[in-house]
Image: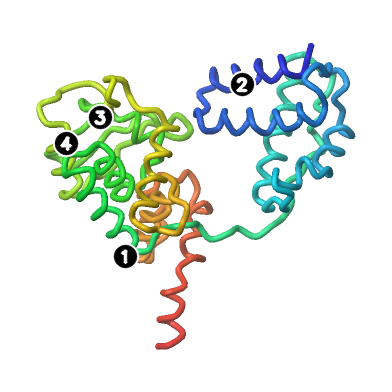
Amino acid sequence: MRIHDAREEFLLQLEANGRSEHTRLQYRRHVGALISWLAPEEDVATIAPTSLARFLASPAARETKKGRERKPGSVNALRGSLKGFGAFLHEAGHLPSNPGRLIRRARCGTLPPRHLTADEQAALLRTLRREDGAHGRDYMLVHLLLATGLRIGSALGLRVEDLDLVRGEALVRTAKGDRPTTVVLSREIAEHLGSYVGDRTHGPVFLGQDGNPITGRHARRRVRYWCERAGIRTRGTPHVLRHSFGMNVYRRTHDLLTTQAALGHASVLSTTVYARADRERLRVVLEA
């Protein structure tokens, strides 16, 4: 079997297993890098631990297209993808053993999460309200991301019938790990959602001009566009807005468990990055 065909089988299995579009795209890119380094016509039978090791040690894995060194976290993500691909090749019966069995993640420090300051968040919302309008779709989406910390896939998966604006709750059916959950809506965001959906009683909350739900790719482009319009230097992404929410909650509470619950993290270890990033709290303690 060609390695290109094996990748398509792998991606199909990931979709069948409920992995998110974002995760599948990452696996596609990472395995695609291996395919480009080998050859699309290469037979999977030729893939061995040594061939994966040579790829991971090569500039193709360690450098960007511009020749810059990749961040340690990015290379670790690549290692994880190839390890998963190798396991699939073995478990699907394409190889007698797992060629990724020797891959290990490198130990490296975790970078602080990129987030917007309070002033940047206010400037972003002001720009959206002024240029997109109080009932604008983009304004609603960005406001929701900043107010709830939802992942973009979860936000775009919201349906009008899943909103309980009286109680201030929203049922999130499309969540990471395929774990439906309920998020709390502040009074402000509940009122904004109410005015945005208007008389609609069913269907996706966020629709495009053609009446179909907007895609994650389009939503990411819009977030980047509005951050640029607001004069924000940080590269604007939906996940930066999620991190901004996480920092807001942690700075108000200084409680990791509360922040974990607000973000829906499965493990509190994922939440500790907000404590490490809170330099203002450290400054207050040191100057006390």
Kind of residue indicated by mark 3: Val
Of tags 2 and 4, the one toward the viewer is 4
What residue does disc 3 label?
205
Of tags 2 and 1, the one toward the viewer is 1
Q: CA distance from mark 3 to mark 1?
A: 28 Å
Classify mark 1: helix, strand or loop.
helix
Kind of residue indicated by mark 1: Asp
Q: How many marks?
A: 4
What residue does disc 2 label?
11
- In the rendered structure, are the residues bearing label 3 and label 1 in contact, judged by CB atoms less than 8 Å apart? no
Q: Mark 4 or mark 3: which comes first in sequence?
A: 4
Q: Mark 3 or mark 1: which comes first in sequence?
A: 1
Specify whether 89 is left or right of 267: right
Classify mark 3: helix, strand or loop.
loop
Kind of residue indicated by mark 4: Tyr
From the viewer's side, name the closer residue of 201 and 180: 201
Within-10-Å neighbours for mark 1: few <14, some 14–19, many 20+ = few
Q: Mark 1 or mark 4: which comes first in sequence?
A: 1
Classify mark 4: helix, strand or loop.
helix
Within-10-Å neighbours for mark 4: few <14, some 14–19, many 20+ = some
Question: In which quarter of the view is residue 90 placed?
Answer: top right
Q: CA distance from mark 2 to mark 4?
A: 36 Å
- In the rendered structure, are the residues bearing label 2 and label 4 in contact, judged by CB atoms less than 8 Å apart? no
**Residue shown at the point (79%, 32%) measured from the top left:** 100
- In the rendered structure, are the residues bearing label 2 and label 1 in contact, judged by CB atoms less than 8 Å apart? no
From the viewer's side, name the closer residue of 86 and 228: 228
On the image, the x and y values in percent for residue 26 come to: 60, 34
Q: Which mark is residue 119?
A: 1
What residue does disc 4 label?
196
Q: Mark 2 or mark 1: which comes first in sequence?
A: 2
**Residue shown at the point (71%, 22%) measured from the top left:** 88
